[in-house]
Image (cartoon, helix red, strand yellow):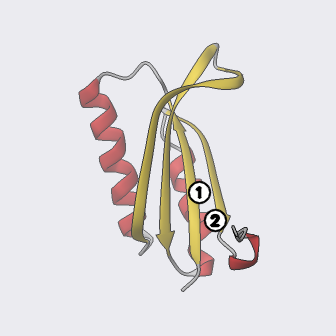
């Protein structure tokens, strides 16, 4: 199965309970689309390049998942419906894009 990077920016003004609810809903959407989570990288609140809905910051979460190729678009559409989700980007991970150090 192909591997994907799922980047999500959430509303930075969420209470901890609301934030946990959003993470649970994201996990439920990933499970619904049969995405196997390999890694989660949570950056927290970071400054945006431009304001989104008048907020200069966003709460960043990145997931590395394995899922079927046809599930990426429906997953993205489902995640975008949430009110507290500001941006979603799903990118297929390709080995040739990895840089070799040394």
In the rendered image, the quadrant that contains the C terminus is: bottom right
Above or below residue 100? Residue 83 is above
Place of residue 3 in the rendered image (x, y in percent of width and height, measured from the top left): 56, 75
Q: Quadrant of residue 58?
A: top right
Above or below residue 56? Residue 27 is below
The mark tally for this picture is 2
In the current view of this chain or complex, which residue is farthest to the front? 102
In the current view of this chain or complex, which residue is farthest to the left? 17
- Tell me if 66 is positioned left or right of 18 in this view: right
Numbered circle sitting on residue 29: none
Place of residue 48 in the rendered image (x, y in percent of width and height, measured from the top left): 66, 25
Are dots 2 and 1 in contact, CB under 8 Å? yes
Taking the spot 57% from the left edge, 21% from the top edge, the residue there is: 57
Taking the spot 63% from the left edge, 65% from the top edge, the residue there is: 73
Above or below residue 45? Residue 101 is below
Place of residue 55 in the rendered image (x, y in percent of width and height, measured from the top left): 60, 16
In the current view of this chain or complex, which residue is farthest to the bottom? 1
Q: CA distance from mark 2 to mark 1?
A: 5 Å
Within 10 Å of disc 2 (Cα), the crowding (few <14, some 14-19, many 20+) is few
Within 10 Å of disc 1 (Cα), the crowding (few <14, some 14-19, many 20+) is some
- Tell me if 72 is positioned left or right of 66 in this view: right
Residue on which disc 2 sits: 73
Place of residue 82 in the rendered image (x, y in percent of width and height, measured from the top left): 48, 40
In the current view of this chain or complex, which residue is farthest to the top? 54
Taking the spot 24% from the left edge, 29% from the top edge, the residue there is: 17
In the rendered image, the quadrant that contains the N terminus is: bottom right
Q: Nearer the viewer, residue 41 or 68?
A: 41
Residue on which disc 1 sits: 76
Give the structural element (helix, strand or loop) at label 2: helix
Q: Quadrant of residue 47?
A: top right
């Amino acid at each position: 199965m192909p591997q994907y990077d799922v980047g999500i920016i959430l509303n930075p003004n969420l209470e901890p309970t609301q934030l946990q609810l959003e993470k649970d809903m994201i996990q439920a959407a990933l499970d619904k689309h049969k995405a196997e989570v390999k890694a989660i990288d949570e950056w927290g609140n970071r400054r945006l390049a431009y304001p989104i809905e008048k907020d200069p910051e966003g709460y960043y979460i990145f997931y590395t998942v394995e899922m079927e190729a046809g599930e990426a678009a429906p997953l993205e559409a489902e995640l975008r419906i949430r009110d507290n989700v500001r941006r979603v980007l799903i990118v297929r991970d390709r080995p040739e894009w990895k840089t070799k150090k040394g």
